[in-house]
Amino acid sequence: MNGQKERLMVLDMIAEGKITAEEAEQLFKAMEVVDEEPASATPELVPPLSHLSHLTDPGPSPASFKDLVAALKEADIDEVTLSDLQELQGHKLTAEYVREMLALGVEPEGLGEWINLRAHDITPRYVRELRDLGLTDLDVDDLMDLKNHGVSAKYVSGLHELGIRDLDADELVELMNNDVSPKYIADLYQAGLKDLDVDELVELSNNDVSARYIADLRQAGFKDLDVDELVELSQHGVSSKYILELGEQGLQDLKLDEIVELSSHDVSPKYVAELKKLGFKDFDVDDLVELGAHDVSPKFIAELQRLGLKDLDLDDLVELGAHGVSPEFIAGMHRLGFKDLDVGEMVELTNHDVSPEFIAELRELGLKDLETDDFIELRNHDISVNFIRALRELGLTDLDVDEIVELRIHNVTPKFVRELGELGFKDLAVDEIVELSIHHVTPRFIREMRQQYGDSLTLSQLLEMRTNGVDEDLLRQLRTAKVKLKR
């Protein structure tokens, strides 16, 4: 091998600053190895260049380096170091590859894009096949995007055969990513859906709208559905079987939105059939949707009927279901003797958290003749059984609902009543306790006044002190009343 020209080329590269002296020395050693070996033998690489071969490839000759550098210059890449050449060779970038891609109009910017093309296995043949199919304006990013997402020339050709042309790289990738194959499109065409754009094809595929699904819907009577309608039916799990079975239950000639509404509220043909067995026959779509939306199940209705509620209409059932009136609640109220409650009363009680257990506890405390309004009044003011029990233990045993509520409204606590008793004010009437609370005649205030004016102060006197203060007139009244003043 005559290495004179190659040596001159290396010297030129040093002079131009493209390689260092150390890199040139490695190239010279490589040339010597090639010159010493017979043409038929596979030369062994000297240790300094072993990293270029990946231990198996003897690496390019200086001539191939020179050819690659020349090809890259044709691609407007003038600055190439030996390290660059080593990396290019590692990705099997050859002068022939560069020139073929340039001839096809592919113009990568910089070595990085050339390496990316090779790394993504984008061959001249792949580019040529795409160009032959009309994809002539693809840049490096487009090519890599198409290749990464498996868009082959065969795929594009299949779309062309269906009349789908002039798609850009993004549209092709979107179709491929959403499993829109030429066969899928052909089947849709066969089912009568034509002139579909990319967004419509993607929407149909994403919602599992198949040609078979369309055919089944037609068999069920829906023959002229557009893309949006097909997608809506599929999204709500509406099958042709579902539509046919609704028809068997007397729900024929339903509109599309009515079917979707029923399905979205889990109103099944079986549900409709069970309602009929329970005696409900004259219902429309709105009735069924209301029942389904409020979880009024056939089991719920059957349990109500077993409790004697047999004359409820659909509005009553929805009202009970919407407010969580359970069969267990009704059964508990029946055990307490409330067997004639109407729907409104049951809803009111449930809304105010009046449970059978609450009523039973009130009865244990002696409150036995209360009506539903009384229970609701107590709950409205957050009066618990413990509150009433504590008042009873302090001697307030004959309180009615109004008195209990009055005490609660004016923040009279069992502690307040107990401390008044400890100060000697026992057996007070409810209105007296309330008045003390309203005017903030607290146990602490009473103790302070007693320290100043003696222990024989009456409630009226204490109220006077709180409302008007202590003046000379009051003091005279206290003396006249023979109150022993400490002051």
Image: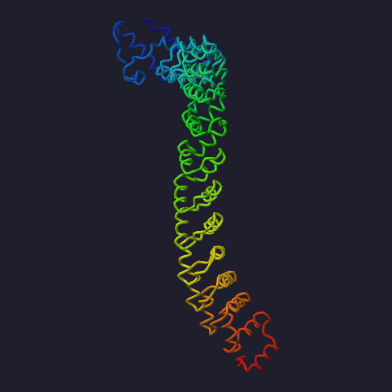
Q: Residue 116 location in percent, x, y?
A: 46, 20
Above/below status of 192 relative to 238? above
Above/below status of 180 relative to 132? below
Q: Residue 22 location in percent, x, y?
A: 41, 20
Q: Residue 477 location in percent, x, y?
A: 67, 90
Depth check: give the residue in front, 315 or 36: 315
Q: Residue 266 location in percent, x, y?
A: 49, 39
Above/below status of 442 relative to 101? below
Q: Is residue 176 visible?
A: no
Q: Is residue 120 visible?
A: yes
Depth check: give the residue in front, 133 or 201: 201
The residue positioned 56% from the left and 81% from the top of the image is: 428
Depth check: give the residue in front, 180 or 88: 180
Above/below status of 97 relative to 363? above
Quadrant (top left/top right/bottom left/bottom right) for the C terminus: bottom right
Colour scheme shown: rainbow
